[in-house]
Image (tube, helix red, strand yellow):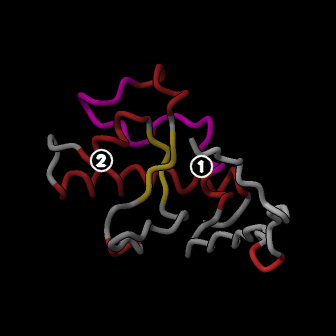
Amino acid sequence: MLRRSHLTRKTPLHATTGLQRTPFKRRAPKKRAGHEPKYLAACRGEPCYLQIPGVCRGACERDSVVPCHANWSAYGKGMGIKAHDIYTVPGCFRCHQCLDQGFSLTDDQKRATWEWAYNRWLPVRAGKLQEAV
């Protein structure tokens, strides 16, 4: 019967210096064209300006108000590009969803609703930001 011996290494394994990991450096995200946080912040705490009939619930939705961007190329919107932040209107979650994905309104109705709300919102935002309209 053959007797087997344990195989042992004469020199211990060490990591080589060429394979050491360097920390991954993250690049700062690119700034989106037209990104102005002050216009987004102005929408916080405001009531819904879209007020789409049959969709908006009014004052009970005040805590879900978000900035709703324009969805048309005339306002800088493009494929994979969001419209500039200056073209935002405070809108509740339900109105925002209807404006972006709703099938109950035609495109002309959506645009008319958004522009009606934007024209009402401009003087209020100007007062909040102390700028001339």
| Foreground: disc 2 or disc 1 | 2
| Farthest-out residue, bottom | 18
At a point 51% along the width and 42% down the height, the residue shown is 66
- Amino acid at pointer 2: Leu
Q: Which residue is mark 1?
A: 124
> Main SS type for the magenta part?
loop
Identify the magenta region. Answer: 41-57
Q: Is residue 46 left or right of residue 21?
A: left
Q: Position of residue 48 (x, y in %)?
A: 46, 36
Mark 2–mark 1 Cα distance, whole angstroms, equals 21 Å
Q: Is residue 48 magenta?
A: yes
At a point 80% along the width and 63% down the height, the residue shown is 13
Question: Which residue is at the front of the view, 92 or 101?
Answer: 101
N-terminal label among 2 and 1: 2
Q: Which residue is mark 2?
A: 99
Position of the N terminus by quadrant: top right
